[in-house]
Amino acid sequence: MAGFRIEGNSSNNVAEVNASNQLKAVLETDVETNPGNVGAVRAFGENDAGSLVGTAYLKSWEISDDYRARVGVDTFLFDDGFNSTTQNTNNWAYTFATMTAAQPGAGTVNFGVVQGTTSAHGAFMRSFQYFPSITTAPVWHEASWGMFTAPLVTNEVWSCGLGLPGSAILLPTDGVWLQLTSGGLIGRLCFNGVFTDTGVLLTPGDYTVGQIYKHSIMVGNNVIEFWRDDVLLGSVTVPGGNGEPMIQGSLPAFMMKHNTGAVSNTNTMRVSNVVVTLADLATSKPWGHQMSGAGSFSGVGQNGQAQGSTCGGFGQGAIAATAAGTNTTANVTGLGGYGVMTAQATNVAAAGDMIASSYQNPAATINITGKNLYITNVRVSCMNTGAVVAVTPTSLVWGLAYGHTAVSLATAETASFATATTHAPRRIPLGMCSAAIGTVVGGSYDKEVWANLDTPICVRPGEFIATTVRFRVGTATASQEVTYTVTFAGYWE
């Protein structure tokens, strides 16, 4: 009999080995009673079971000099989906040549809605935001996509990852992406025009038409990993002469379908969402800063909303018309903005607050993503216009109203368990400012009114937020006006 027989001195039990000739061992289970039996082991974490690459993918922990386990905390960079029926032009740039992309309102952006048939046809979208490659912190790019109407055919190319295409038909010359053709899926690393590719990671038969798969790319300093549905597909090592994965150091996310020659049929690729994170590095940026970087600053419209600025009263046309204030109609419609209001003729406190600006957080629908609007800062500046202040000073009391379910400040709060709940406005005083007797046309009020909200105000979908003003005057000068700007700072979530 080959080998050694290991037998207990008193128990006469025999040790056993497994099929790989490794000794079967059970670590001490009663540490308190037998602390001397506890030895040292090396701990590893299993990132992937190796079902495709053939071997388990293990990573060791890192321990600091103070014997603490190092823990990586990710930083959010970008997250966007495609449930609206229009392009989010704040987040995405779009370029096409004959082949087109569109958002049908079914939760995806579709490439090949109009299918090009020659090598001159293609389309791509890329994020306006750029994502940095930091030596000690990998960048994760995740996108969920799949074939929709038919498998890809010869000369069709689908690409998705980090990079900046040169045109509707020219792939990036720098970046990292996954590329699917009729020959299968490969991973691509391009450094200043020089490609380092994986072999075929998946065959066309590994993709079911109509199914969407989550694809992930980990861009590390020395290696690039490619995953599908949390299973490691393969990797490429960054060539030693490069030093960095990408020469540019920072690139946008992109998705692209183009032809390299004549194609024989029409089909569509669908993308449901794109996410980018900075791994293992807590940048300590406030959450609002992260939201702003991802295109969710309060000053811009979101998916399904009107694109462009949310601010009212500013534009390339004529200045805002002068109007008498009311508590039922907004003088300026927008999240803050620029307005002109007629000064009240007498001290009419009973008239109540006037709506200087009003904005409704769009109500959520299937095609409008419901987002909470967090307001962190409000600032009001005023100027005397129309006529010199005479007889008595003009004083303005500014406030913030929010949470109401209709534009009118008279909107009532429904009783408990009344059907179709409505909200009255919640109120916060902002402050006061005055224009002294003799303040000329174009003269400023004595101070700006502003509030830095350490606890942000949350405006939920469908609710309004308004700035209000109340005049406190003895006798206003004929033709006297108040020109004002209202500035909001905040973010969407």
Image (spheres, rainbow, N blue to C red):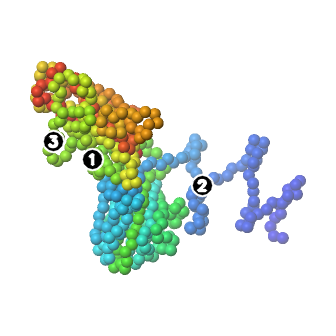
Q: Give me the disc on residue 45.
A: 2
Image quarter for residue 263?
Answer: bottom left
| Camera-nearest residue between 83 and 325 | 325
Residue 146, quarter of the rendered image: bottom left
Q: Horizontally, is 439 left or right of 179 in the view? A: left
Residue 330 seen from this side: yes
Amino acid carrying mark 2 in the image? Gly
Q: Name the mark nearer the viewer: 2 or 1.
A: 1
Question: Which mark is first along the chain, 3 or 2?
Answer: 2
Mark 3 residue element: loop
Question: What residue appears at the point 23 percent right and 33 percent down from the top-left corner?
Answer: 326
User: Where in the figure is residue 406, as x and y percent of width and height?
Assistant: 33, 39
Q: Is residue 290 left or right of residue 67?
A: left
- Sequence-first tag of 2 and 1: 2
Q: Dot 1: few (<14), some (14–19), or many (≥20) neighbours within 10 Å?
A: some
Q: Amino acid at mark 3?
A: Ile
Instruction: Give the CA separation, mark 2 to mark 1.
Output: 47 Å
The location of residue 179, given as percent across then percent down, is 42, 68
Q: Nearer the viewer, residue 40 or 164?
A: 164
The residue at the point 11 percent across, 27 percent down is: 478
Name which of mark 1 and mark 3 comes first in the sequence.
1
Q: Are marks 2 and 3 in contact (CB under 8 Å)?
A: no
Q: Residues within 10 Å of mark 3 (few under 14, many from 20)?
A: few
Q: Residue at x 34, y 58 (%)?
A: 85
> What residue is disc 1 on?
309
Residue 275 found in image quarter: bottom left
Q: Quadrant of the C terminus?
A: top left
Circle 2 packing at 10 Å, graded few (<14), some (14-19), many (20+), is few
Asked whether the beta carbons under mark 2 and mark 1 sit within 8 Å of each other, the answer is: no
